Image (cartoon, coloured by chain):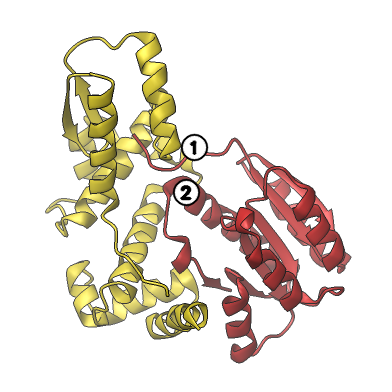
């Protein structure tokens, strides 16, 4: 027996406005061997409405820390209030973050914080690692309370 | 008021399994973690009922050969970490011995099904165990390194950082900060 129901595919949401960054994520996902679905959104309000409307919550959200209406902390707080999203992992990406800001993000419910590298190929590698790590958490029943990563 | 618990998942699964199998009147023997032997053939409708009952507890009955092999590999790794006993031979040889299969075939199936090489899965499992020992059992890094058979504290610390992006101390601080913010 195993103690985690394996999903058929990973459902992923990409929320942010920087098109070059979004392209990097899409390139990384296109090379994945594991099946996935992808929704792309640009603003915080769109993201929250999408999450509210979906019958099956996504497994992973890549969220731009510079998102607006509401801002990233507003989004994180709304998401953490929704118990349907308890098993949804949130990966924030940003150009620059100091340690205090990162701690605020983790406290508000982020699982992964990514300092966006200058080289977008490095971002593609990070995105692939995040997806694979999240897959391990989904399929092995690992302790989500301790699921925090930093890139 | 929030209280933090430590659960022995393995034991909980065995208790649930025994309760459900007894409820269905199925004579059985638990061979090892994740394996049950039935004394008689299980009728299909009972098997389906068992499947549904266990699914409510997020326990899956594996009936696919590749998935079965992968689960056996994961069970072997989990047993090693649970019992804090590293095999005296290389892990690849140990898996070959336990599964009676060529390691190349084992490794190929594992990466195909899990999207991660066995070696990386083992490191991930060790780091997860380290997290639990640091946070739930409040062991020191030295004690954790010893318990998980790392050659040194530095080795554990470096592997922890490579795997999580955090040094163990910063990781502890963030998790403890998170716990405090939930309780206030």
- Quadrant of res B36: top left
The x, y position of residue A44, in whole percent, is 83, 67
- What is the x, y in percent for residue B118? 38, 48
Tell me the chain of label 1.
B
Report the disc number at residue B64. none
Asked which quadrant contains residue A118, the reply is: bottom right
Chain B, colour shown: yellow
Q: Quadrant of the N terminus of chain A?
A: top left
Horizontal arrangement in the rendering, residue A114 relative to residue B102 (left or right): right
Which hue is chain A drawn in?
red
- Camera-side residue of A15 and A118: A15
| Residue placed most toward the observer, A104 or B109 | A104
User: Split into 4 quadrants, where in the image is the C terminus of chain A?
Assistant: bottom right
Q: Are marks 1 and 2 on the same chain?
A: yes
**Image location (x, y in percent) of residue B98:** 19, 36
Q: Residues within 10 Å of mark 2 (few under 14, many from 20)?
A: some
User: SS at mark 1?
Assistant: helix
Of residues B9 and A135, the one drawn nearer to the viewer in this rendering: B9
Residue for point 65% across, 66% down: A81
Q: Which residue is mark 1?
A: B112
Q: Is residue B183 left or right of residue A2?
A: right
Which residue sits at x=39%, y=59%? B124
Residue named by callout 2:
B116
Q: Is residue B108 visible?
A: no
Query: Where does residue B177 sit, x and y in percent of width and height?
Result: 47, 84
Q: Relative to B48, is A134 above or below?
A: below
């Amino acid at each position: 027996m195993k103690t985690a129901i394996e999903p058929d595919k990973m459902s992923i949401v990409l929320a942010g406005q920087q098109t070059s960054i979004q392209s990097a994520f899409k390139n990384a996902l296109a090379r994945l061997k594991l099946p996935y679905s992808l929704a792309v959104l640009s603003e915080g309000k769109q993201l929250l409405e999408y999450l509210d409307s979906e019958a099956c919550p996504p497994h992973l959200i890549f969220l731009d820390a510079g998102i607006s209406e509401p801002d990233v902390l507003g989004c994180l707080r709304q998401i953490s209030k929704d118990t349907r999203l308890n098993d949804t992992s949130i990966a924030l990406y940003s150009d620059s973050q100091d340690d205090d800001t990162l701690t605020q993000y983790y406290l508000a419910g982020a699982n992964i914080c990514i300092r966006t590298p200058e080289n977008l190929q490095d971002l593609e590698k990070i995105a692939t690692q995040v997806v694979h790590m999240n897959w391990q958490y989904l399929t092995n029943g690992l302790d989500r309370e301790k699921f925090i990563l930093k890139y | 008021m929030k209280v933090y618990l430590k659960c022995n998942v393995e034991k909980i699964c065995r208790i649930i399994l025994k309760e459900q199998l007894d409820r269905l009147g199925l004579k059985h023997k638990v061979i090892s973690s994740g394996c049950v032997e039935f004394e008689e053939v299980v009728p299909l409708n009972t098997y389906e009922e068992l499947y549904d009952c266990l699914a409510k507890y997020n326990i899956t009955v594996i009936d696919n050969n590749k998935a079965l092999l992968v689960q056996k590999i994961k069970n072997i790794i989990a047993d090693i970490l649970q019992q804090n006993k590293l095999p005296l031979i290389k892990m690849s040889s140990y898996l070959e011995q336990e599964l009676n299969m060529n390691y190349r075939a084992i490794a190929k199936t594992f990466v195909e099904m899990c999207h991660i090489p066995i070696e990386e899965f083992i490191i991930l499992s060790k780091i997860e165990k380290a997290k639990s020992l640091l946070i739930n059992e409040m062991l020191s890094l030295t004690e954790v390194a010893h318990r998980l058979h790392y050659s040194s504290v530095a080795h554990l610390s470096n592997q922890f950082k490579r795997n999580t992006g955090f040094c163990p101390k910063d990781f502890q601080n963030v998790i403890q900060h998170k716990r405090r913010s939930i309780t206030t």
